[in-house]
Amino acid sequence: MAFMKKYLLPILGIFLAYYYYSANEEFRPEMLKGKKVIVTGASKGIGEEIAYHLAKMGAHVVVTARSEETLKKVVSRCLELGAASAYYIAGTMEDMSFAEQFVAKAGKLMGGLDMLILNHITNNSMNLFSDDIHLVRKNMEVNFLSYVVLSVAALPMLKQSNGSIVIVSSTAGKMANPLVAPYSGSKFALDGFFSSIREEYSVTKVNVSITLCILGLINTETAMKAVSGILDTNASPKEECALAIIKGGALRQEEVYYGSSVWTFLLLRNPGRRILEFLSLRSYNMDKFINNQALP
């Protein structure tokens, strides 16, 4: 009891204060003016809306997805909305060599990179999992591994600009849900990997922020089709969701929650985990830790 009063309660108080009051900086659209931003999965849905918001804020934008014809329309609309510049590079994130080369090409087009917004996913339907190992592998490769590849490729430019990585994830990456096991596995992997990398960046003084966006049900065409007849819950607007993602990245928040009940997100914001992560660092030999090169 004495240990709890002396150590755990003060630590808990500090973390609760940090968690709920550290993101009070006001977002201003001009924060994105002239910034160089990559948006993946930008041919429709949330990614498309992110591109349009960035365009209105005067950012340079490079978008990617599989459909070249749709990307042309997105770029044209971005320019109409006031983007400093807008380009597209079509390709599939199933191809890891494309993912790596895409970042290099995008950086060359814009002359650098300030923010990498990773939003793409592979197609899924809501079904009981049986034995489809191919589907699990595809989810892990597209929804997780390609994110790592893109981040690795972007890191040198982001270090130069003290930039940001924004990971679009889901409540399915924070809590168990039926009918989405392969998708959920890939989203949990994003949390584990990028939260660990955030810790490494913090200790090794790499000034690149990592924002994990935990989304509920959003009213994109793909999502509404997937849950039709299965889920009975209200969907949140994709336009507001896209803006929340941009705000979180611009303010360098660690996590953004959007699109579900207040209770869901209050319970998912787990201060116990943060306390344990903080305490676990005490068991490391920090000299060796800091001498190692930060990943990715």
Image (spheres, helix red, strand yellow):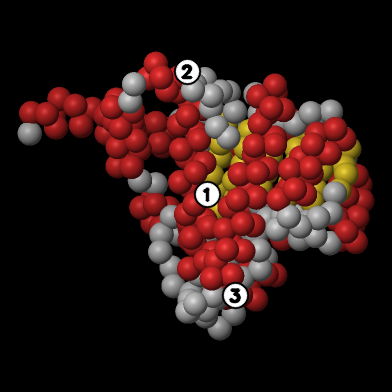
Residue toward you, 197 or 35:
197
- The mark that comes first in sequence, 1 or 2, is 1
Check residue 175 in the rendering and tell me which mark sits there, or answer none. Answer: none
Q: Is residue 24 above or below residue 90?
A: above
Quadrant in which the N terminus appears:
top left
Left or right side of 29 for 191: left
Note whether residue 195 is visible. yes
Residue type indicated by callout 1: Leu
Label 1 CA crowd tier, 10 Å (few <14, some 14–19, many 20+) = many
Residue furthest left as drawn: 1
Check residue 291 in the rendering and tell me which mark sits there, or answer none. Answer: 2
Label 2 CA crowd tier, 10 Å (few <14, some 14–19, many 20+) = few
Q: Are marks 1 and 2 in contact (CB under 8 Å)?
A: no
- The mark that comes first in sequence, 3 or 1, is 3
Left or right side of 195 for 116: right
Position of residue 200 measured from the top left corner of the image (x, y, whole percent): 47, 29
Residue at mark 1 to residue at mark 2: CA–CA distance: 25 Å
At a point 23% along the width and 27% down the height, the residue shown is 10
At a point 47% along the width and 79% down the height, the residue shown is 130
Determine which residue is flagged by label 3.
125
- The mark that comes first in sequence, 2 or 3, is 3
Residue furthest bottom as drawn: 229
Check residue 190 in the rendering and tell me which mark sits there, or answer none. Answer: 1
Residue toward you, 6 or 207:
207
Residue at mark 2 to residue at mark 3: CA–CA distance: 45 Å
Residue at mark 3 to residue at mark 1: CA–CA distance: 20 Å
